[in-house]
Image (cartoon, rainbow, N blue to C red):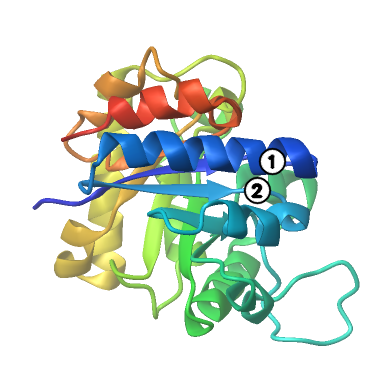
């Protein structure tokens, strides 16, 4: 099963207007030079930069996504942004369930599933993040944790066309540490089996599963080459054009 590689940059809470636009334009120009159509590229800036970044990448194949959303379309939700609003400003994707949201904002699987379903209904594609903590890994609970997060966080309306899973071991995010390639493939293969159980084999075979957690130019090629790894959700390395493009260059062709 051939699945188009997706390289997504999660800028997190980084970037003022001038720097964010410059970064987006840099990715746009460098990606255009590659001429590649076998790889999708996505940048996910903070809410404050979405409109400006969308304008900056206009005329290219670089897509734009948000880092979170509320599940409601509108209402008394101070500080929140709805999927409809994101779609209205030109977003293609939204990330939900990132470990930093699960931890810092105490988001549950049920809430994440609500967000994902609302985003899909609004016409967005979703990247649903899952992953275990270091304590859970040391206890041998990696597969169990990921299974519960998939079963609880992925809505029933998810398909391979509207949903991407991102496996990010929490202990590897921003630490420079990564699991071995064998460990990554083991988890990704297990994830695909769980998706098959929840959404059927056809969706599981076609659904993209990204790896995140200290993916960088020096390890991207060996990670993305794994059979069940279909790209990366990139944090720190997405904030530098050269590093982000090096990861894109390392992706499957």
- Residue 219 point in image, percent of width and height: 36, 16
Q: CA distance from mark 2 to mark 1?
A: 8 Å
Q: Is residue 198 visible?
A: yes
Which residue shows up at 52% across the image and 40% down it? Answer: 9
Above or below, 165 against 113 in this view is above
Q: Quadrant of residue 142?
A: top left
- For residue 154, side relative to residue 49 (left or right): left
Q: Which mark is residue 220?
A: none
In the picture shown, does residue 31 fall above or below 220?
Answer: below
Label 1 element class: helix
Position of the C terminus by quadrant: top left
- Name the element at disc 2: loop
Point 37% across, 38% down: residue: 31
Mark nearer the N terminus (2 vs 1): 1
The answer to whether 50 appears left or right of 117 in the picture is: right
In the picture of the structure, the residue carrying the numbered disc 1 is 20
Residue 45, numbered label: 2
Which residue is more in the foreground, 246 or 184?
246
């Amino acid at each position: 099963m051939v699945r188009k590689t997706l390289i997504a940059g999660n800028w997190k809470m980084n970037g003022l207007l001038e720097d964010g636009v410059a970064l987006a334009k840099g990715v746009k120009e460098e990606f255009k030079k590659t001429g590649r159509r076998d790889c999708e590229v996505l940048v996910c800036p903070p809410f404050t930069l979405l409109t400006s970044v969308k304008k900056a990448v206009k005329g290219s194949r670089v897509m734009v996504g948000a880092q979170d959303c509320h599940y409601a379309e509108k209402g008394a939700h101070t500080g929140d942004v709805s999927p409809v609003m994101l779609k209205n400003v030109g977003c293609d994707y939204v990330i939900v369930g990132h470990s930093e949201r699960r931890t810092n904002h105490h988001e549950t699987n049920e809430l994440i599933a609500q967000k994902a379903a609302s985003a899909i209904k609004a016409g967005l594609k979703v990247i649903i993040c899952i992953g275990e903590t270091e304590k859970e890994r040391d206890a041998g609970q990696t597969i169990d944790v990921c299974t519960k997060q998939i079963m609880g966080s992925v809505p029933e309306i998810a398909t391979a066309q509207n949903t991407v899973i991102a496996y990010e071991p929490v202990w590897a995010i921003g630490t420079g540490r990564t699991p071995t390639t064998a460990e990554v493939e083991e988890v990704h293969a297990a994830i695909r089996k769980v998706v098959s159980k929840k959404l059927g084999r056809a969706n599981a075979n076609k659904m993209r599963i990204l790896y995140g957690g200290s993916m960088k130019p020096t390890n991207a090629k060996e990670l993305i080459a794994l059979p069940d790894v279909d790209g990366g959700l990139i944090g720190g390395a997405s904030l530098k054009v050269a590093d982000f493009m090096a990861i894109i260059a390392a992706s499957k062709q």
